[in-house]
Amino acid sequence: MKLSVAFTLFLPLLVHAQYPAPTETYPESSPAPASSGTPASSTPTSTPASGTNNINVQVAAGGQLVYNPSNFTASNGTTVTFIFPPGALPHSVTQSTFANPCTPLAATGGNPAGFDSGLQAGKQFTIKITNDQLPVWFFCKNTIHCGLGMVGAINAPTTGNTYTSFVAAAKAIGSGETPVPDNGPVTGGVNAVATATPSPTSASSSSTSSSTPSSPASRVVADGLLAVLAAVFGITMV
Ligand SMILES: *[C@@H]1O[C@H](CO)[C@@H](O)[C@H](O)[C@H]1NC(C)=O
Ligand SMILES: *[C@@H]1O[C@H](CO)[C@@H](O)[C@H](O)[C@H]1NC(C)=O
Ligand SMILES: [Cu+2]
């Protein structure tokens, strides 16, 4: 049992090290889709305050595989700003469905696809609620994070398809999750819409001094070291 716990905890690191996230392979300067008065996505953006018109969600709050808050209501026109911590382990906010918590909401027929921040660190990503009568389900696409319960809901029903059932369904998938490719950010969405790709969070709103983002190469090396440590640690735990 200890082995399976250790394995579940460290497998994401191992897999992540083997397939470094292509977070930085798309040009950061690519123009964001039209949105009123938003600075270019390469410009550090200060984080808005949580209030009547905006709700901030900390991604991987406290270093845990969670969103905080992860279950809340938001009315039409409210923006929800997801704040990704800097560091080697990227996360995503990817829209899914109640039926398939760990699978991106794909376009079908006339229905648009879900929003997707893509795997990110040190960025922020904003969606705006367009229909508060229907739920918005989302998850992190980094390997097995969803199966470990890294999911969230906005305007979840209070009976039937509840947030609690959604989390349980994600955890039931566990490590059996189908790997989700990362092709960078996807704007649009259903019941909540992103109009711009993620932008760097300004230094002033991220309290750490890590103003120089590590290069992809050094991130891979760091992740590799983590994986080795994790493997050794995992074995000694048995
Ligand atoms: C929010 O917008 C949707 C879509 O236009 C609409 O159906 C719904 O009634 C609106 N919610 C409220 C509280 O007005
Ligand atoms: C999730 O949010 C809904 C809607 O606000 C609420 O009714 C429900 O009690 C919450 N569930 C949990 C587990 O917090
Ligand atoms: Cu994650």
Image: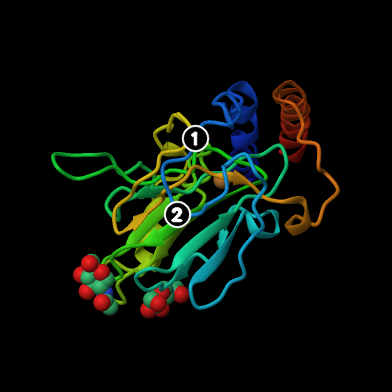
Q: Position of residue 186 (x, y in %)?
A: 41, 39
Q: Can residue 100 be seen in this view?
A: yes
Q: Is residue 16 above or below residue 85?
A: above
**Residue drawn 41% across the image and 50% down it:** 194
Q: In which quarter of the image is the N terminus?
A: top right
Q: Is residue 171 above or below residue 52?
A: above
Dot 1: what SS? loop
State the image quarter where residue 26 is shown: top right
In the image, ligand 1 is in what quadrant? bottom left
According to the picture, the residue beneath numbered tag 1 turns out to be: 31
What type is the residue that disc 2 sits on?
Ser
Q: In which quarter of the image is the C terminus?
A: top right
**Residue drawn 81% across the image and 37% down it:** 212
Which of the two labelled residues, at mark 1 and mark 2, occupies the earlier sequence position? 1
Is residue 47 toward the left or the right of residue 77 in the image?
A: right
Nearest the viewer among 216 and 163 is 216
Is residue 98 toward the left or the right of residue 163 in the image?
A: left
Q: Position of residue 62 (x, y in %)?
A: 70, 59
Q: Residue furthest front?
A: 37
Q: Position of residue 137 (x, y in %)?
A: 37, 57
Is residue 24 toward the left or the right of residue 73 in the image?
A: right
Q: Residues within 10 Å of mark 2 (few under 14, many from 20)?
A: few
**Residue drawn 54% across the image and 44% down it:** 198
Q: Is residue 133 visible?
A: no
Q: Is residue 165 above or below residue 64?
A: below
Q: Position of residue 182 (x, y in %)?
A: 47, 31
Q: Which residue lies furthest to the left in this view?
A: 109
Q: Which residue lies furthest to the right in this view?
A: 209
What type is the residue that disc 1 sits on?
Pro
According to the picture, the residue beneath numbered tag 2 turns out to be: 36
Task: Report how many numbered discs are placed on residues in the image.
Answer: 2
Dot 2: what SS? loop
